[in-house]
């Protein structure tokens, strides 16, 4: 059964009342006096050379304040790792959502009409839309001048290959010869989308030479850096504020349209606001889940022991690299999987195409790669006649094991995740036996934690109330709200005594924001460290008053007491009041980055993705029904077990797992970008189907809590992305159990399942 | 920073303009005399002229449910409903749910953990309110059907179902005790 909130300790999210009453403002809800309405003009062709871009008629339309193009902003290439794109297209367009121009007008309708008056002529160029064909010597190039880009790092690049990585340990070819059984599989995953329910919005207002930008971003500091880089502004003249954020799932990571709107507001000489339509939200951001081809060959002994694996992964980068440079190595880690494999040889390439750019959508590369490798794993188990759970039991990494890339793991809970999820499903099947077209499926997965610098300021005010100032970004998970619990615990006060100021780059110390499941791991460590500074001050103050050693002072329940002396205590609020007359209670910390482990495998094109800090593990076990006449699959139950270290916020943690699983069901069954000549054909919610409340199964979640050293605060790891990884894989294995063969394309739509059934009949 | 007035000014356009009518809209019990183009959708007027931005716009196509409001108690996607058609009817938005205290649905959805990013929440609450008005003690299946027009990308829905169930039981208890008294 789903663990309900009544079984969990209460969690107060400070942004909750705002969100349920409608008083909370999201970016599109804001306006300022004199504000213009912005609209972008997109290429609408996948690849072409701009022959004419004439904005004269648009500029002359009554009610239009400004129309800007590449000629109106600094002419430079940007993007991390491989600067390969401009704010506005110049000469060549490489995907349909590329921005040609931006309009500011008196209202949205006039802005739209002005965009329609922009005279555009684009000469079509050959569309690169096939990953295999893009690798051929005679393929057209997405970037003719790729060699001139000033890439950082040592990643091999070649023509349409934007980045390449390989992981090699031992001699896989020779080891393969020793195997009793060798299985080869090929899987193809379509791209998909983050689809936050809030379409993004950006509002920019200049005051003198400084600009304030309100934006729906998961990463305000990265957004600020993008604006500074592209508009050539010093950091302290750009202030990024994120009002309530209506979901992101990675789609709102990175730097997107903040600079376009800032430049437009400058040209219009008035504030400007951009609000995306749902279609624009599908087409234009450089963050979508990448399509992927995975080819795997694995050798096993008759006892079911994996002895070698060789694999190749092709990843659709789309037209520009955005943040995807590290995807090959990450995908390689996922097609290796959380298994002990003594000899391995994996290659992965990020391939330029004329598609929307790929980027970090919730656990980038992982759900697709996990779907491929875990489908392959069931084929291996079949080949040696082992039950899928037993096969995994014999090959997964346990505490103290060396993973295939040569990292030795400390205490980890994958084996327990496998046992608990499988047992939970088995108990359900014992109670309600499988129906005639039902089967179960299991998949294991893993995901790294990312340790990066982050700072926090904490102050205790004269009445004992506390203010946290953090660069963390609340995207809905509740992770930022949980920061109050950490500070409260350190300071011996109630979470309700704590207010959190967040999502304003002008006041908060830098941090990663809501990306890579990092909020608690990094911002949490900073808040913990800053709170401890104040706690130490409080202990010193109390020790002097109570004539005790500072080390004996215990801060709890709003009191500073002495360990072992129940009678002696002072109210923390009183200590705060006296401190307000002397040394103020201020904490400011940048928590040290945890030490990263090392690996022994040879990594070409190393992007730092082979050595995993505080790896998270999970197992999802599902019951699925398939209608053999229609191919429609229905997920009936998901039993999840996760090792994400210590769980700090149980309701939030369950919410992450449940939400991740339901997103995973969508990716498994319905969510896939359909493309024709490089253009998206289902850029709307009617055509691109999310799971509804009527579709969702019973979800049971268990946490294997391991107090993990060298990780997040209180032995925690990340959790936001991991729940999204294993679901599609487990569903694939259940579908295979019903229909008898693997569906080798993702999503496993009714049509594809039905076709697989029909092909097996022939 | 104030809420937006998206269409307060009407520029000259080359496109044929819709005719402008004097309309009185009653939102959460308050009357708003307005001059509106006949082509204006209800959500843009609620968010613009009326100044209540709790009603969200997620798709402009009746697919996500974030713009759900009640018209005489019936849930409608206000993105695809003409504002002039709402004249003379009681419009309820999420801002009209709470009295001095939070509405039980609001309280319970928070307690259950059914709110994450919160963008779908107003629409979800309005659909739930309409459901409980017509079906005071819905089964889980009825809750699923009643809320199936509201997409949530964060929560996986289970805690939303729980919140609606808890509210139905709570309100039923209130009704029973008032009958007993």
Image (spheres, rainbow, N blue to C red):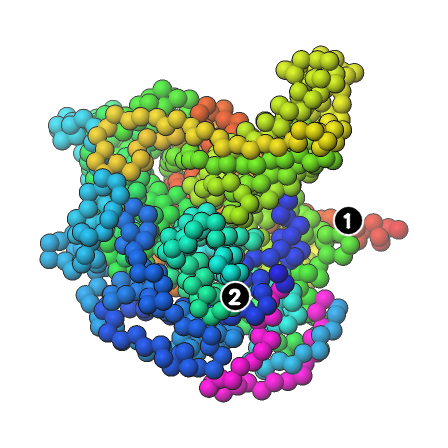
Give B35 or A263, whichever is nearer the viewer: A263
Q: Secondary structure at mark 1?
A: helix
**Chain letter of the residue beneath label 2 in the structure image:** A
| Residue that numbered label 2 is attached to | A271
- Examine the structure image and report whether residue B27 is included in the region drawn in magenta: yes
| Count of marks placed on residues | 2
The single residue placed furthest to the right in the displayed view is: B181
| Residue that numbered label 1 is attached to | B173
Q: Which residues are magenta?
A: B3-28
Our reading of the magenta stretch's main secondary structure is loop
Left or right placement of residue A39 versus residue A317 in this view: right
Q: Position of residue A297 (x, y in %)?
A: 20, 37
- Examine the structure image and report whether residue B60 is included in the region drawn in magenta: no
Q: Position of residue A443 (x, y in %)?
A: 37, 37
Judge whether A448 appears above or below A709 on screen.
Answer: below
Q: Position of residue A222 (x, y in %)?
A: 42, 48
Left or right placement of residue A702 versus residue A735 in this view: right
Of discs 2 and 1, which sits in the foreground?
2
Q: Secondary structure at mark 2?
A: loop
Judge whether A236 appears above or below A5 on screen.
Answer: below
Judge whether A538 appears above or below A361 on screen.
Answer: above
Q: Is residue A740 visible?
A: no
């Amino acid at each position: 059964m789903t663990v309900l909130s009544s079984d969990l300790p209460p969690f107060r999210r400070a942004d909750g009342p705002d969100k349920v009453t409608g008083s909370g403002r999201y970016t599109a809800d804001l306006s300022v006096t004199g504000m213009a309405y912005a609209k972008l003009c997109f290429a609408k062709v996948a690849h072409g050379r701009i022959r004419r871009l004439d904005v004269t008629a648009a500029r002359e339309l009554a009610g239009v304040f400004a129309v800007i193009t590449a000629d109106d902003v600094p002419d430079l290439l940007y993007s991390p790792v491989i600067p390969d794109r401009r704010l506005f297209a110049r000469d060549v367009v490489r995907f349909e959502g590329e921005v040609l121009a931006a309009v500011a007008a008196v209202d949205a309708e006039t802005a739209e009409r002005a965009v329609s008056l922009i005279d555009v002529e684009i000469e079509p160029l050959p569309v690169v839309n096939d990953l295999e064909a893009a690798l051929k010597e005679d393929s057209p190039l997405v970037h003719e001048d790729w060699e001139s880009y000033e890439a950082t790092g040592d990643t091999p690049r070649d023509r349409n290959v934007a980045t390449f990585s390989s992981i090699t340990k031992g001699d896989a070819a020779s080891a393969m010869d020793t195997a009793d059984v060798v299985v080869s599989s090929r899987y193809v995953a379509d791209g998909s989308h983050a689809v936050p329910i809030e379409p993004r919005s950006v509002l920019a207002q200049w005051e003198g030479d400084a600009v304030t930008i309100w934006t729906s971003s998961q990463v305000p500091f990265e957004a600020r850096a993008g604006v500074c880089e592209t508009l050539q502004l010093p950091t302290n003249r750009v202030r990024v504020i994120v009002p309530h954020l209506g979901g992101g799932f990675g789609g709102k990571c990175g730097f997107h349209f903040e600079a376009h709107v800032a430049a437009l507001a400058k040209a219009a000489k008035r504030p400007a606001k951009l609000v995306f339509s749902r279609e624009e939200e599908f087409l234009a951001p450089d963050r979508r889940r990448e399509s992927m081809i995975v080819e795997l060959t694995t050798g096993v002994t008759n006892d079911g022991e994996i002895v070698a694996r060789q694999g190749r992964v092709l990843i659709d980068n789309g037209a520009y690299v955005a943040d995807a440079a590290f995807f090959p190595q990450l995908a390689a880690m996922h097609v290796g999987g959380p298994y002990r494999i003594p000899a391995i040889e994996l290659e992965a390439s990020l391939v330029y195409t004329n598609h929307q750019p790929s980027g970090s959508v919730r656990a980038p590369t992982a759900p697709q790669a996990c779907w491929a490798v875990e489908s392959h794993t069931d084929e291996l188990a079949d080949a040696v006649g082992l039950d899928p759970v037993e096969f995994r039991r014999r090959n997964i990494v346990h505490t103290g094991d060396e993973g295939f890339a040569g990292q030795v793991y400390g205490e980890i809970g994958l084996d327990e995740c496998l046992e608990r999820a499988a047992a939970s499903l088995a108990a359900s099947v014992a109670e309600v036996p499988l129906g005639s077209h039902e089967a179960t499926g299991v998949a294991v997965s893993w995901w790294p934690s990312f340790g990066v610098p982050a700072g926090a300021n904490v102050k205790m005010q004269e009445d004992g109330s506390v203010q946290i100032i953090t660069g963390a970004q609340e995207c809905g998970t509740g992770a930022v709200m949980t920061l109050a619990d950490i500070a409260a615990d350190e300071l011996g006060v109630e979470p309700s005594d704590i207010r959190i100021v967040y999502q304003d780059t002008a006041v908060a110390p830098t941090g990663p924001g809501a990306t890579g499941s990092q909020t608690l791991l990094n911002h949490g460590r900073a808040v913990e460290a800053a709170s401890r500074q104040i706690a130490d001050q409080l202990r010193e103050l109390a020790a002097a008053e109570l004539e005790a050693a500072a080390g004996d002072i215990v801060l709890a329940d709003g009191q500073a007491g002495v360990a072992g002396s129940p009678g002696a205590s002072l109210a923390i609020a009183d200590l705060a009041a006296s401190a307000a007359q002397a040394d103020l209670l201020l904490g400011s910390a940048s928590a040290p980055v945890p030490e990263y482990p090392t690996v022994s495998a040879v990594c070409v094109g190393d992007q730092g993705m082979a050595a995993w800090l505080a790896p998270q593990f999970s197992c999802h076990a599902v019951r699925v029904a398939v209608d053999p006449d229609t191919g429609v699959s229905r997920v009936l139950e998901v039993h999840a077990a996760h090792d994400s270290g210590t769980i700090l916020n149980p309701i939030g943690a369950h919410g992450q797992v449940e939400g991740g699983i339901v997103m995973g069901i969508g990716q498994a069954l319905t969510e896939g970008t359909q493309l024709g000549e490089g253009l998206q054909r289902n850029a709307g919610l009617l055509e691109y189907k999310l799971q509804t409340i009527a579709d969702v199964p019973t979800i049971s979640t268990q946490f294997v809590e391991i107090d993990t050293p060298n990780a997040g605060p209180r032995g925690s790891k990340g959790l936001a992305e991991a729940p999204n990884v294993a679901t599609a894989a487990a569903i694939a294995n259940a579908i295979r159990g019903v229909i008898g063969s693997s569906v080798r394309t993702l999503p496993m739509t009714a049509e594809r399942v039905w076709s697989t059934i029909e092909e097996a009949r022939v | 920073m104030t809420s937006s007035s998206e269409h307060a000014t009407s520029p000259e356009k080359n496109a044929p303009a819709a005719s402008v009518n004097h309309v009185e809209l009653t939102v959460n019990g308050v009357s708003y005399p307005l001059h509106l183009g006949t082509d204006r959708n209800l959500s843009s007027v609620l968010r613009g002229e009326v100044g209540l931005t709790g009603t969200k716009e997620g798709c402009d196509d009746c697919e996500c449910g974030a713009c759900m409001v009640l018209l005489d108690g019936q849930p409608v996607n206000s993105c695809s409903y003409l504002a002039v058609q709402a004249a003379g009817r009681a419009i309820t938005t999420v801002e009209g749910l709470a009295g001095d205290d939070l509405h039980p649905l609001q309280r319970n959805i928070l307690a259950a953990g059914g709110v994450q990013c919160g963008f779908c929440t107003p629409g979800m609450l309005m659909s739930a309110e309409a459901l409980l008005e017509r079906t005071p003690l819905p089964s889980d299946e009825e809750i699923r059907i009643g809320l199936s027009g509201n997409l949530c990308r964060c929560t996986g829905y289970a805690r939303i179902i729980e919140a609606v169930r808890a509210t139905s039981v709570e309100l039923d208890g209130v009704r029973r005790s008032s009958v007993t008294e």
